[in-house]
Amino acid sequence: MTEEQTVDVVVVGAGFAGLYMLHRLRRSGMRAVVLEAADGVGGTWYWNRYPGARCDSESYYYSYSFDDDLQQEWTWSERYAGQEEIRRYLDHVADRFDLRRDIRLNTRVTATSWDEEAGLWNVGTEAGDTVRGRYLVTAVGCLSSANVPDIPGLDSFEGDWYHTGQWPHEKVDFSGKRVGIVGTGSTGIQAIPVIAAEAAHLTVFQRTPNYSIPARNGPMSPEVSAKIKQEYDRIRAVQRASTNGHPFLINETSALAVDDDVRTATYESAWEFGGLRFRATYADLLADKAANDTASDFIRNKIREIVKDPEVAERLLPKDHGFATKRPPIDTEYFETYNRDNVTLVDVRATPIQEITPTGMRTSEHEYPLDCIVFATGFDALTGPLLRMNIRGRDGVALRDRWAEGPKTYLGLQVAGFPNMFTITGPGSPSVLTNMPTCIEQHVEWIIDCLEHMRDKGLDRVETTEDAEREWGAEVARAADRTLLPQASTSWYLGANVPGKPRVFMPYAGGMANYAKTCEEVAVRGYDGFVMT
Ligand code: N01
């Protein structure tokens, strides 16, 4: 039998965003329900169980800041938390704040429509249930819609195949197996060393070579952990004031304003320290091609030093884009893995994949016999998770049609024609260019303030305008054009990884702090760009 339920706010997704949204809605006295497709909470950290899955932001700041008791009582075991530890953390949050009673698991949203007359969203689930809410808040993540390439013959493959973002819960045993992996983004770069250490043979099918910085992971000592806990107020303040939501600021000096030996020493020390701070070594790495070249050349030289076979090293050198103009991965022994006897690197730009056969992968040059294939081929990012909910707004207009030429939003928070719908970390917000929990908290808090404002004023409908969307879209484009990011033509920031997807630079590249200030000013000015009735 199908069920109907009516609440103030329907939230979709129970990852970092949905859990915090529910907590804050409850605190504001609003009735909310969270619909979650998985059979557990955790979002990204529920699904991405592939070998080597680990966060690229450091554990102590890839976490919630909203509750000091929570951050004091939780102790991270490593510099970068692994998938399982983050999943446990989010489970802990769900229990600690008693969130589960309003979360419906195993509930995939398949159709969502605005009922103009009733002023309600009807959110339909795969099981045929309908949940109605005055407001709809999407907390579906930016990277939750798996992109499995349409390679002829996949159905005929007699071995097992996996997408990293839909990994089985039980351990996949690669020992003694010939494994092929497609993709060398952040995911592939994490998984490749781990799979290579277990498999009989690993063949890496690489389309675009990538830069990567060593993570330098290790255990978190009790002393470091205690010091961080004492300093959390300062750490969180820096995160909020920063460009990327990290607890460090970008050096204000140009890479071109210092002597070569000073710059090399700076890069050397950032390489030794490890992690995403490498990107913050100079002010203009993402803004000036000549500055970026210095960092890109440094990393290319590191690849040449690490990889013993010069031909393999050459194939691994990124040449068509600058460092960090695509999302920069960090790694544990990624380039070193190509020195193993059981690893083969195939350049599928030079020799394209033509088909999958029952027993392997055929490129234009060779057939590689495989027992398993791993697709580390990323996601239909940012728009994919929203579009697959089949959202229809006023007059039955489909979001898919409204966004046929690319996403249009105001502040990445609302879409004209879709009243009372808020998109946490939607396209047009800093989202994937930042440490996600930081920008999620900012969005949730802004939405809560907006809903409380409306309640206080006796209003129950809020919708942005096409003018506000147009102006914000122009600002998103201007912010991107001040950087080198749109020039990376194979970037998923542009939708380039999904065939047929409109090429539009989707996240807001003007920085977390600037963005938060803009949102705050909009609220102070009485929510300009939104019509409230
Ligand atoms: O996906 P990607 P990802 N044939 O899109 C290749 C976050 N993340 O899952 O570059 C052959 O980056 C594709 O090639 P190309 C992080 O934000 C975070 O690795 O399009 N190859 C590329 O090499 C990250 O950026 C963490 O030419 C094909 C790869 O597959 C985002 O998730 C860890 C292909 C896809 O790389 C996505 O990363 C992991 C085809 N048909 C990820 N299609 C942490 O912080 C695609 N490729 C823990």
Image (tube, grey):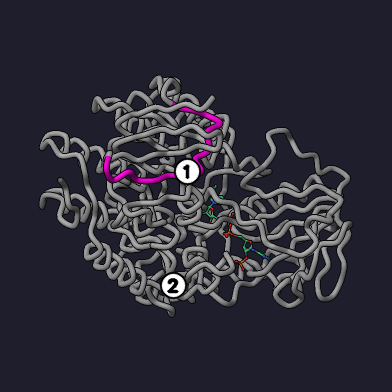
SS for tag 1?
A: loop
**Residue 486, which numbered label?**
2
Determine the residue positioned at 22% across, 62% down: 468
**Residue 58, which numbered label?**
1
In the rendered view, would you say 382 is above or below 313? above
**Residue 93, which numbered label?**
none
Determine the residue positioned at 35% across, 62% down: 408
Is the N terminus in the top left, top right, bottom left or bottom right quadrant?
top right
Amino acid type, mark 2: Pro
Return the residue nearer the eye: 295 or 8: 8
Return the residue nearer the eye: 90 or 337: 90
Q: Residue furthest bottom?
A: 290
Residue 151 spot, x, y in % from top left: 73, 64
Chief SS of the magenta region:
strand
Instruction: Give ligand 1's quarter of the image.
Output: bottom right
Residue 493 spot, x, y in % from top left: 47, 64
In the rendered view, would you say 469 is above or below 179? below
Q: Earlier in the sequence, mark 2 or mark 1?
A: 1
Numbered circles on residues, count: 2
* Residue 394 is a magenta residue: no
**What are the residue bounds of the magenta stretch?**
103-117
Residue 266 spot, x, y in % from top left: 45, 63
Q: Nearer the viewer, mark 2 or mark 1?
A: 2
Residue 501 spot, x, y in % from top left: 52, 67
Amino acid type, mark 1: Glu
- Residue 413 appearing in the image: no
Determine the residue positioned at 46% across, 35% down: 14
The answer to which image quadrant residue 101 occupies is top left
Residue count near mark 2 (Cα–Cα under 10 Å), binned few <14, some 14–19, many ≥20? many
- Residue 121 appearing in the image: yes
How far apart are labels 2 and 1 at the CA level? 27 Å
The answer to which image quadrant residue 445 occupies is top left
